[in-house]
Amino acid sequence: MIKRVPAAPASPAPVVYGQSERPPRGDYARAGQVKADYTCPQNYASYTQEDHDTYRRLYERQSALLPGRACDEFIAALPLLGASSRIPRFDDINQQLRPATGWEVVAVPGLIPEVPFFTLLANRKFPVTDWIRTPAEFDYIVEPDVFHDLLGHVPLLFNPVFADHMQAYGAAGLKAHRLGACEQLSRLYWYTVEFGLIRQNDGPNKGLRAYGAGVLSSPGELVHAVTSPEPQRIALDLLRVMRTRYKIDSYQQSYFVIDSLQQLFDMAAPDFTPIYMQLKSLPELEADAELAEDRLIQR
Ligand code: HBI
Ligand code: FE
């Protein structure tokens, strides 16, 4: 009799974007707990007191910098994340987030490949890295950790317009993958969802503010993006952004500015297929490129 040995459940392979000397940080094997869609349990019991302290200290430092620098929608939604003195439980966040916009957060071991990433977004699930940086990385970390993913990305998922935009982005990502245009689309994500600025045109809080998660979760970049005279700030143009390369290990040299979250949704709602065609005949641009047709935004 032949005994069939069931194949060991394969753990999804770790993912690295860009060039890095270091191995990926997340624990992708984790005793078979990482599922085929790359989600995993949050493993709340594995956080140490030091981990919770790191989250609390990061949260305190960052929330002090938000007034006058973060957009109104972000500041309004931040308290909905709940606990700030320890790493929140994703289940608790979902109790608030699901009824608000139908989104939920799901735990992942770190960066995940494009197709599972886009698939989760298209289904209104936001992947949140479950580990937190070490105290030695308090000021700077290249990869997303639980602090970046939660504090940076999740508050705006409580905003109905932004919530719909993120789902449309996920669907656009799946299409871009089929068309071989992920690089172009990820530039849009980078310069909006990660490093976007918004001009608040009226109300008591008029002014240039951040809505991108990479800006909002970094003390240095938040001040740099909103107030430094160094970077250029350019009114967002879809083709311009999709042509522009980006740097992942320094402050941005160019930020792109929108006037409303609705503008983001309206821009990404149409099919990008003709845009990708057009891009084939346009040269790519460096991160600090200056074009005559750029509409510069003064602070
Ligand atoms: N995975 N966990 C995680 N978080 C991200 O922000 C992320 C990712 N995989 C791919 C990705 N981002 C970007 O490269 C997409 O724009 C394609
Ligand atoms: Fe991010």
Image: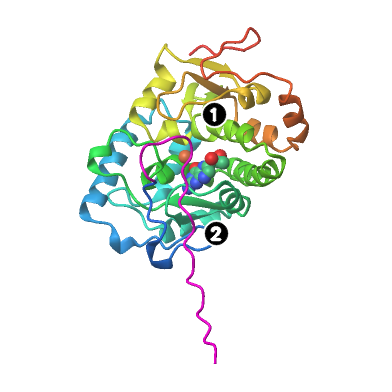
Majority SS type along the magenta span: loop
- Residue range highlighted in magenta: 1-23
Question: Of 45 and 64, which appears nearest the observer?
Answer: 45
Q: Which residue is mark 1?
A: 191
Q: Amino acid at mark 2?
A: Asp
Q: Quadrant of the N terminus?
A: bottom right
Find residue 54 and report its image quarter. top left
Drawn side of residue 49 relative to residue 2, left or right: left
Crowding near the residue tagged with mark 2, few <14, some 14–19, many ≥20 C-alpha atoms within 10 Å: some
Which residue is located at x 66 percent, y 47 percent? Answer: 174
Indicate the amino acid at tag 1.
Tyr
Classify residue 221 as left or right of residue 242. left
Residue 239 horizontal/vertical position (percent): 68, 24
Q: Residues within 10 Å of mark 1 (few under 14, many from 20)?
A: many
- Which residue is the site of mark 2? 37
Q: Is residue 6 magenta?
A: yes
Note whether residue 211 is visible: no
Q: Residue sitting at 45 percent across and 55 percent down?
A: 108
* Secondary structure at numbered mark 2: loop
Separation of marks 2 and 1 at Cα, in angstroms: 26 Å
Residue reaching furthest top? Answer: 292
Residue 228 location, x and y as percent?
40, 15
Q: Which sits earlier in the primary sequence, circle 2 or circle 1? A: 2
As helix, strand or loop, the secondary structure at mark 1 comes to helix
With respect to residue 86, does 253 lie above or below? Answer: above
Q: Which mark is residue 128?
A: none
